[in-house]
Image: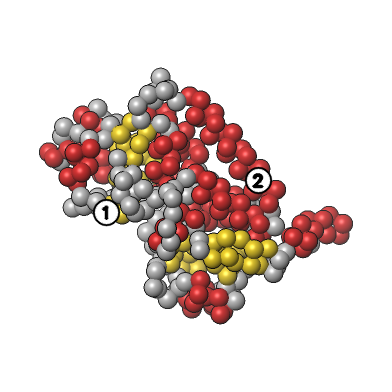
Amino acid sequence: MKSLPLALLAASFAGPALAHPVTVQSCDREVSFDTVPERAASNDVNLTEMMLVLGLNDRMVGYTGISGWNKLDEEIRADIGELPELSERYPTREVLIGADVDFWFAGWNYGMRVGGEVTPDTLEPFGILVYELTESCIHIMSREGVAIDDMYNDIRNLGVIFGVEDRADDLISGWQEELAEIAATIPEAEPLRVFVYDSGEDTPFTAGRYAMPTAMIEAAGGRNIMDDVDSSWTRVAWEPVVERDPEVIIIVNYGEVTAEQKIEFMKSNPAFADMDAVVNDRFVVLEYVEATPGPRNIRAIRALASAFWPE
């Protein structure tokens, strides 16, 4: 940056300087930014990738909550460069204060817990402003449901906060065009019955009405058989899964139990032997970063559409 001509340097910062102060809606709060954050951090792999795709690396001092239970893939690792992980799991308030963070992109159950020690209210006295992941707002307020627009909303708001609205708008326009292309390939037919298997053997952890996979499945021509569960990511019983007889099972791949082991569990359990998806061996694997709100949702929808409706 030091080698840039002064005129170009001035132009590169003209937008943010003129645009601020700005105010964005974050769940049930309005958050105002007098200046562009200079020492930002993000929690979890999908929120971090939203920051990276907007080119905000140079505004970040690190990230939190990934390696304690997940991992960076090569694509993210290449973009994240030398940024340090400030905490392997949910950070404490002291970790964020100690890193002199001035902005944290997190969500409820994405770095923050309702009633926990790290919340927008507990961080603001230390000069740390928080923007909350839209999908996670259901944990603190009522919502209509989940939509791909939730991801667009987060990208758009980050663009406003960091003065990169044009970049955000270009990304969203490209994703919308790609989604329209995918929609054109989906046949007019009854939506496929789809179950999302995240983890758990005694009781499955899955995506309910307010979790992003519900919107992704619908965009690919399916229906989440748990879309009447009035929650986001949650546990259900196996009985309704068997009764609703999914035609396709989406495996969310992360953690110590591999996707192959999860599929084998489904195939080897006698209770699932007559399940349509098991009989026809229709499993689709999505990485965690694809199944949670983030830039890879669109390519994941394309993969789902191809799996749901093979030629």
When asked about the image quadrant of residue 221, the answer is: top left
Looking at the picture, how far across and down is residue 201, in whole percent? 20, 50
* Residue found farthest to the left: 270
Visible residue check, residue 62? no
Visible residue check, residue 160? yes
- Residue 261's label in the rendered image is none
Q: Is residue 283 left or right of residue 36?
A: left
Helix, strand or loop for disc 2: helix
When asked about the image quadrant of residue 194, the answer is: top left
Q: Amino acid at mark 2?
A: Asp
Q: Is residue 155 left or right of residue 260?
A: right
Looking at the picture, how far across and down is residue 112, in whole percent? 43, 67
Residue carrying label 2: 169
* Residue found farthest to the top: 311
Quadrant containing the N terminus in the rendered view? bottom right
Question: In the depicted view, which residue is nearer to us: 107 or 1?
Answer: 107
Q: Amino acid at mark 1?
A: Arg
**Which is more N-terminal, label 1 or label 2?**
2
Residue carrying label 1: 235
| Residue positioned 67% across, 48% down in the render | 167
Question: In the depicted view, which residue is nearer to us: 200 or 264?
Answer: 200
